[in-house]
Image (tube, rainbow, N blue to C red):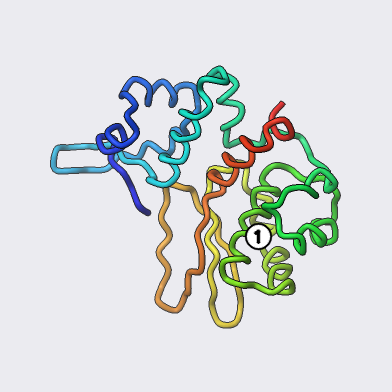
């Protein structure tokens, strides 16, 4: 995992120490992103680089239009909606249309929680990057549903990998790096929390109540 130190984070973003920890208290930044590690000066705080920079960018863009309480709701890693119907997903161009068409059949339902939607977008992104066929997308989705359904928060990363002749996924906390052996071909790693931030902001009237 690519980490950034607290000192470098403050320098790059221009925010203050006080702002950073206030946003932590307000749950705008997940506590698990504050990673303590030993350094030559003693214990230092590091963060997952891509996730924290993306989150702070979102906060700075939105803070003049929303209260901290509203921002906390928008950016919360927990599910923010009860269910959303398949019809309400039709205009979301982030979702592959082939996957959209098979979701009711594969999931066995017509309404979805927020993690379902963020995960479908992750598969859509991965499928486009690694050129998966419709059948491969469906097979990957079917294999992944059980593991995806056990995730209680969007504060995870999804790694897509290939071994033998099969495509697979694995979920891990954003703060926990995964190291595979040499026989595993890692194809893509996507942060579900980054996807969640993006679509909550873009479709805030649909997802945040």
- Is residue 191 rendered to the left or right of residue 208? left
Q: Position of residue 180 (x, y in %)?
A: 42, 68
Q: Where's the N terminus, which quadrant?
A: bottom left
- Is residue 198 rendered to the left or right of residue 28? right
Q: Position of residue 41 (x, y in %)?
A: 14, 38
Is 130 in front, or is 91?
A: 91
Residue for point 63% across, 41% down = 199
- Is residue 56 rendered to the left or right of residue 117? left
Residue furthest out toward the bottom: 164
Residue furthest out toward the left: 40
Question: Is the residue 130 above or below the residue 79 in the image?
Answer: below
| SS of the residue under disc 1 | helix
Q: Where's the C terminus, which quadrant?
A: top right
Residue for point 50% across, 26% down = 27
- Is residue 54 rendered to the left or right of residue 78? left
Is 11 in front, or is 118?
A: 11
Residue for point 57% across, 20% down = 66
| Circle 1 residues within 10 Å: few <14, some 14–19, many ≥20 | many
Residue for point 81% across, 43% down = 88
Is 67 in front, or is 27?
A: 67
Number of numbered tags placed on the structure image: 1
Q: Position of residue 171 (x, y in %)?
A: 55, 55
* Quadrant in the rendering for residue 183: bottom left
Q: Position of residue 11 (x, y in %)?
A: 27, 34
Question: Is the residue 129 above or below the residue 196 in the image?
Answer: below
Residue at image mark 1: 124
């Amino acid at each position: 995992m690519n980490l950034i130190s607290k000192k470098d984070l403050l320098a790059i973003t221009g925010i203050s120490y006080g702002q950073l920890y206030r946003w932590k208290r307000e749950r705008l930044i997940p506590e698990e992103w504050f990673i303590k590690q030993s350094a030559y000066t003693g214990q230092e705080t590091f963060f997952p680089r891509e996730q924290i920079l993306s989150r702070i960018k979102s906060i700075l863009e939105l803070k003049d239009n929303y209260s901290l309480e509203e921002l906390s709701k928008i950016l919360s890693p927990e599910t923010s909606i009860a269910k959303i119907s398949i019809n309400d997903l039709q205009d979301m161009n982030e979702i592959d249309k082939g996957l959209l068409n098979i979701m009711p059949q594969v999931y066995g339902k017509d309404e979805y929680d927020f993690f379902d939607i963020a995960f479908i977008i992750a598969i859509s992104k991965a499928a486009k990057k690694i050129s998966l066929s419709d059948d491969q997308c469906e097979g990957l989705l079917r294999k992944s549903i059980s593991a995806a359904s056990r995730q209680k928060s969007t504060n995870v990363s999804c790694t897509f990998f290939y071994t033998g002749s099969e495509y697979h996924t694995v979920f891990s906390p954003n703060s926990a790096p995964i190291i595979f052996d040499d026989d595993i071909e890692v194809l893509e790693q996507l942060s579900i929390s980054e996807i969640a931030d993006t679509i909550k902001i873009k479709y805030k009237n649909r997802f945040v109540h």
